[in-house]
Image (cartoon, rainbow, N blue to C red):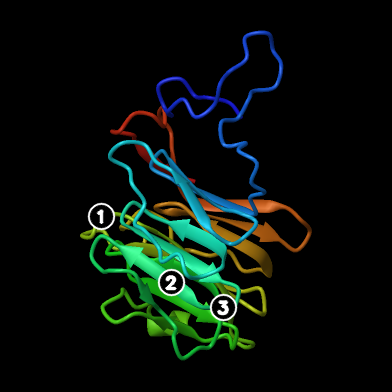
Amino acid sequence: AAVLAGCAPDLTTPATDGTAHEHPYDDGHQYSWVTMHDLSVAAIDEAGAIHTWEQEGYDFPELPAEYTYTRIDGTDVSLCGLDDRGLLVCSSENDAARLVNPEGPPAVSWTNDAKGRAIWVGDDGEVRWEEGAEEPPPDDLTAAGGAVQVVGRPGDVSDGLFGCLRFATGAVSCWGGDGREGSGIVPPGEYGGVSTDLASTCVLTATGGVVCWGVVRVDDFCDPDEDWEPT
């Protein structure tokens, strides 16, 4: 792992002779999943327990320890974990830890809005959301075969969520995007994966390529006052 001077905390012990870095998280556990947000790291160990390494002022919300987690992901206000039964557990600054889908079906994918509320896809292909969450536009919810993936990147509460759904057909539909030019325009195609930033999207094509659209930062990404331009 490399440290970007001035942009990231010193999460590694850099070697001075060009050899591999010694990672302080190598503590004897076998981790199966890792996520990072705002300079803090959370990972799942071999027993399904969550470990966190948090920078001061960038704490993850806590999740209940009684679940055996297989995946976790978070934002600056929320953390959600998927357990080995497909139960989705979320905690945020606005809401205490809670089970999102106590009556099923098992969740396969989720994202969170700017308030930390979950939008999730069940193994039946249906898109659901917690009460009070930002609802995807109705036109984005239907496609043959149902949905298989939802991703999103919340901005400020006033900006709302920029989100995308990927369907079993490979189609992708996006919404929101803080008004950034071109963020919700999806080129036709069948895609094998999708990921979003605040107002840009990248997909995996059927031939293994990567296609991105929306906007990109053109200045140093460490500068909090970046300019943006459409791509």
Looking at the rendered image, the disc whose residue lies closer to the viewer, 1 or 3, is: 3
* x and y percentages locating residue 85 in the rendered image: 59, 79
Sequence-first tag of 1 and 3: 3
Picture disc at residue 86: 3
In the figure, 165 relative to 63: above or below?
below
In the figure, 217 relative to 176: above or below?
above
Residue 101: which quarter of the image?
A: bottom left
Looking at the image, the residue that sits furthest to the left is: 158
Mark 2 is surrounded, within 10 Å at the Cα level, by few (under 14), some (14 to 19) or many (20 or more) other residues, namely: many
Type of the residue with mark 1: Asp
Q: Which residue is mark 2?
A: 89
CB atoms at circles 1 and 2 under 8 Å apart? no
Type of the residue with mark 2: Val
Q: Residue at x 62, y 88 (%)?
A: 144
Mark 3 is surrounded, within 10 Å at the Cα level, by few (under 14), some (14 to 19) or many (20 or more) other residues, namely: many
**Number of numbered labels in the structure image:** 3
Type of the residue with mark 3: Gly
Q: Which residue is mark 1?
A: 156
Secondary structure state at the residue bearing disc 1: loop
Q: Residue at x 38, y 54 (%)?
A: 75
For this view, does 30 lie left or right of residue 142?
A: right
Q: Residue at x 33, y 47 (%)?
A: 59
Structural distance between the alpha carbons of marks 1 and 3: 29 Å
Q: Is residue 22 among the parts visible in the rendering? A: yes
